[in-house]
Amino acid sequence: MLQLVIKFVFGTIEYFSLCLLSLSLFRFPIIQCWKKIACIALIVEAVSIYQREVLMINQHYAMLGMLIVYILLINILLNIPTFFAVIICFFGYVSFSIVQALLLMTVDYFQFTSFEKLTHSLKDIVIMQLITAVVNCSLVYWMSNRRIGFVFIEKRVVFNTGTRMANVLLLIVLLLSFGVILFAVVTFFQNESLMYVYLGIIILAIIALYITYQKNKKELLDHYNRLKDRNRSI
C-alpha cells in the first residue's frame, strides 16, 4: 500500500511537470491555472495507477488511456477546444519523450542507474521522476522568461498550399519520432549498439519541433503585420 502511495505521489509530480511543459509550449497562462493543472495531473495519474496496478493493463495501452483522459481534462477544465487540446497534448508528449530519453541515456552513460533498476527499483524510479520533473520545470521557467512558445492563429488571412504540405510532413516526422522514441526508451538498454540510431531520431524530433516553432513564429508575425497594415488603411 505504501509503495502504491509513493508511486502515485511522485508520478503525479512528474505528470504535473509534463502538463506545465505541454501548456508552456503554447504560452498558456499556467500561473493563473496551476490548481486546475494540478487537478489534471492528479486525475490522470490516478487513472494510470488504476489501469496498471488494479486492472493490470500493459503500460503501453495504459498510456493510450492517459492520453485520452488528458485531452478530455484539458478540454473541460481549461476550456480549450478539442482540436487544440489534442495538439497541446501531442507536442507535450513529444517534448517529454525527448527529455526523458536524453535523461535515460545520460544516467545510463554515467552508470547512475540501469534499465533493470528503473523497472524494479522504486527508489531509482522515484529519483528519475524527480529529475525529470526538475528538468521539465526548468525548461518551463526558461521558456516563460524568454517568451518562447507556439501561438494559435485561428483565422488565417492567407492559407498557402505549400505551408499546408510542410505542416503535414512535419506532423508525420513528429508522429514517427514520438513512436520510435517510446520504443527506444524501452529497448535502449537492451541493445547499446543502437544508441546512435536513437540519438539521431531524437535530434530529428528536436529539429522538427524547432522548424515548426519557427514557422509558427513567422506566421504569427505575418498575421500581426497584416492586421497593422489593415488598421492603417482604415
Image (cartoon, helix red, strand yellow):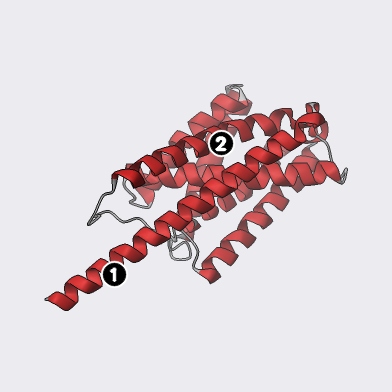
Residue 219 in percent (x, y) is at 35, 58
The image quadrant that residue 203 belongs to is top right
| Residue at 55% in and 64% down | 143
Residue 79 in percent (x, y) is at 33, 51
**Does residue 190 sit above or below 202 in this rendering?**
above
Which residue of the protein is positioned furthest toward the front in this rendering?
Answer: 162
Residue 38 in percent (x, y) is at 51, 53
Q: Nearer the viewer, residue 216 or 101?
A: 216
Question: Secondary structure under badge 1?
Answer: helix
Question: Secondary structure under badge 2?
Answer: helix
Residue that label 1 marks: 225
Q: Is residue 208 visible?
A: yes
| Residue at 46% in and 50% down | 212
In which quadrant of the rendered image does the N terminus lie? top right
Q: The residue under label 1 is which amino acid type?
A: Asn
Residue 181 in percent (x, y) is at 63, 35
Q: Which mark is residue 178?
A: 2
Q: Earlier in the sequence, mark 2 or mark 1?
A: 2
| Residue at 68% in and 57% down | 134
Q: Is residue 197 left or right of residue 57?
A: right
**Does residue 230 sit above or below 163 in this rendering?**
below
Q: How many marks?
A: 2
Label 2 or label 1, whichever lies nearer to me, is 1
Q: Residues within 10 Å of mark 2 (few under 14, many from 20)?
A: many
